[in-house]
Image (spheres, coloured by chain):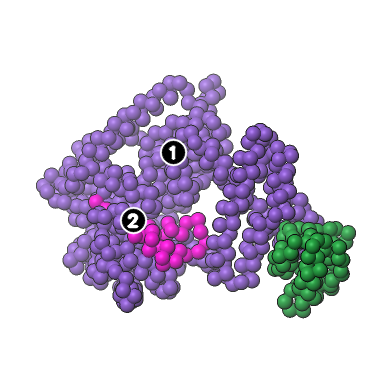
Amino acid sequence: MIQADRFTGEVFLRGVAAAPGIAIGRAYLYDKQTPKVVERSVDAREIDDEIQRLKNALQRSTKELEKVLAFATQKIGDRKARIFEAQIMVLHDEFLFHEVERRIRVEKKNADFIVSDEIGKYQHRMLSAEDEYMRERAFDVEEVKNRIIRNIDQDLLFSRLEGFSVIISEALSSADTVLFSRNNVLGYATDHGGITSHAAILSRSLKIPAVVGLSRASKSVATGDLVIVDGFRGLFIVNPTAERLREYEEKRTRYLKFEQELEELRDLPAETLDNRRVEILANIEFEEELEAVRHHGAAGVGLYRTESLLIGRDDFPDEDEQALAYESIAARLHPLRVIMRTFDIGGDKVMVESQAPEENPFLGWRGIRIGLDRPDIFLSQVRAILRASSRKNVAIMLPMVTTVQEVRRARRMVEQAKEELHSASIPFDDAVPVGVMIEVPSAAVMAEHIAREADFVSIGTNDLIQYLLAVDRGNDNVAKLYSEFDPSVLLTIKRIIDGAHRAGKKVGLCGEMAGDPLATILLLGFGLDEFSMVPSLVPSVKKIIRSISFAEAERIARGALEFHAVEDVEEFLREGVRSFVSLLLVPEREE
Amino acid sequence: MIECEVTIRNRAGLHTRPAASVVKLAAKFKSDFFLVKDGMEINGKSIIGVMTLAAEQGSKLLLRFNGPDEEEAAQAVVSLFEEGFGEPM
C-alpha cells in the first residue's frame, strides 16, 4: 500500500516489521540483481582511483572464480570446470585490460562502463557468428563481464557508504546483511522477504531496524532521499514532513532509553519470583553476532547455524577451515557454552552441490538425512566441531531428525569421528553432548524415546508448526492457518517437554516462539528448561521471566490447554497475561 | 616475421579448451602472435580474442609470428595445431 501526500511529497509504505527499532537517515538504493551500467564522466583526478577499482574487481573476481573452479573440478568434472578456467583467463587477458585501462584514461569514463562496452564488442562478434558454440561462448563471457561489474559496483558501494545510510533493496541475502552491518548501516527496507527470512532474523540479531515485504520500496525512493524505517509497526516513510521527523526522533530517543533499561538486566539470572531458574540463550548465524550475545546477557548460544559457512560459496569448507571457525566461536564464548547444529541444508536452505531440484524439498533430502547419506560431509564437520570442544563448552545438535534409528546412526558416526581424532592424538572433549532437534511431527510423537538416545533435545518451532499444520507460512493462501498458539501445537510442545523430562533430559526451544512475550509465559509454565532466540530479544524475555512466578505460569499454561480453537487460546492468554504484558512491551508497539 | 597456414584437425574445432591451450602456450614466448581467418586478425595472446574465432574441423587459419623468438614460437604453436590440441580427431 502506498500513500503519497501530494502537498508534502511524503510517501508512506506499509510492510512487515522484521526487526525492531527506528532508523532515520539517507536512503541508499542497492540493486544487485542485474548490474546496471551507467555511463559517467570521471574527473581527471579520480582516474587513478577508477583504475584501482578495476584492478581490485579483477582480483576479487579471480578469487571467486578460483573457488568455483576448485569446487567444479572436484564435483562436476574437468570438462565443465574448463569453462571457469577460461573465465579466469579472461580476467588475466592483458591485451583486453590494457585496452580497457587505456580507454578509461583517454575517454575519462567509469570503469564498469568501459568494461561493459569493450567486452560487449567481443560478445557482439560471437553472437553475429550465428553458431551455437559461439552463442554459448558469448554467455560465458557475459558471466565474467557481470562478475567484474558487480565487483566494481561493490567497491563503489562501500566507498559511498561511509556516511550512515538506510539500505533499500528488492531483496537482501544474509551475506548482504552482514556485509552492510560492517559498514554502519542504520536500517533496511526491502520489497520482498518475510519475518522468518534469514536476513530478517539477522537484522534483529544485529539490532538493525528492518521492514520487509514492502512490495515497492525500491521503486519509491532514490539514493539520497531522507527516509524513516519504523521497525515496530512495519512502516517505511520517504521524505517525511518536519512534523513526522520530530515525532520519530522522539520515538527513537524513548526506545533507546527503554533498551538501556533492559540492558541493566544483563548480569541478572533468568529466575522467576519463586526462584525457578531457566536459561536464556541466543541463536546465531555468524561470528559477528557474538558481541550481541554478550551484550544482551545471554547465557550462551543455544543454536549456532553452521550452514552460514556455506553462504556465498559453491563448495564445502574443508575440515581445517571449519575447525578454525568453530574454534574461534568456542574460544570467544568461553566460559559460556555453544550448541553447534550440523549443516541444515536442503529444504529452502543452501543446496548441496548441483543437486537437481526436488518436487517437495521440505519433504526431501535435508538436514541429517543428507549428513547420513554423505558421511564425508558429516564426519569432517563433526571432527571439526570436536576439535573446537576441548574447553568443554561445545555441544553438537542434529537437525531434522525423523526417527530413533537416525539418532543411533548419527551417534555411531560421532563415535567414529572421535576415534579418528583420538588415533591422530588431537585433543577434544570426549563427553561432548549430542542433542537432537525436534522439528518433525514423528520425532515429536517419539520425543521420549528420542530423548533417551540423546543428551538433550531442542524444539525447532518454525519447522515443527509448518509440518504439524501442513502450512507453508510463506504461502499467502494458507499462511493464516500458521499459529504458534494452535491447540495442536501447544499439546505437541507439552508432549515433547514431558517426554524428554521422563527420559531425564533437558529441553530447549530455538524457534521464533521462544522470543514471543505471550509464548514465554506458556513455555515457562510447560516446564521448558532453555529458551533460545535472537540475541536482541534476550533482555525482554528475561524481564518477563523475572516478573512472574512459576506457579502462576503453570496455572496459565494449564488453562491454555483447556481450549480447542486457536482464537480461544489466544483470547485466554491475552486475558491471563494482561497484567504482565503491560509492563513488558515496548511502548511503541501500539498496533 | 613468420607466417604459416594450419588446419583445424580435432573434431570439436577451436572451442574454449583449445583456445585456452593456444593462448597459454603463446604467452611463453616474447614474439607477437596473430591468427588470421576470413580477413580478421586476432591477437593470439588474448583469450577473449581467440574465443571470438569460429573455426570448425577442417577450416584453415593463417598464423603470424613476429619477434626475437618467432621461430621457436611458430614451431611450438604449429605443432599444437597439428596434434589437434590433443583431442579426438
Look at the picture and state if B73 lies above or below B88: above
**Residue visible at 64% across and 71% down in the picture:** A79
Chain bearing tag 2 is A
On the image, numbered disc 1 is attached to which residue? A184
Chain given the colour green? B
SS state under label 1? loop
Q: Are marks 1 and 2 in contact (CB under 8 Å)?
A: no
Chain given the colour purple? A
Residue A479 in view of the camera: no
Whether the magenta-drawn stretch holds residue A375 is answered as: no
* Residue A568 % position (x, y): 27, 47
| Residue lying farthest to the right in this orientation | B39
Whether the magenta-drawn stretch holds residue A308 is answered as: yes
User: Which amino acid type corresponds to the residue marked 1 in the rendered image?
Assistant: Asn
User: Which amino acid type corresponds to the residue marked 2 in the rendered image?
Assistant: Ile
Front residue of A12/A338: it is A338
- The label on residue A329 is 2
Residue A62 in view of the camera: yes
* Residue A217 % position (x, y): 52, 37
- Find the magenta span and give its range: A299-327
SS state under label 2? helix
- The label on residue A422 is none
Front residue of A13/A204: it is A204
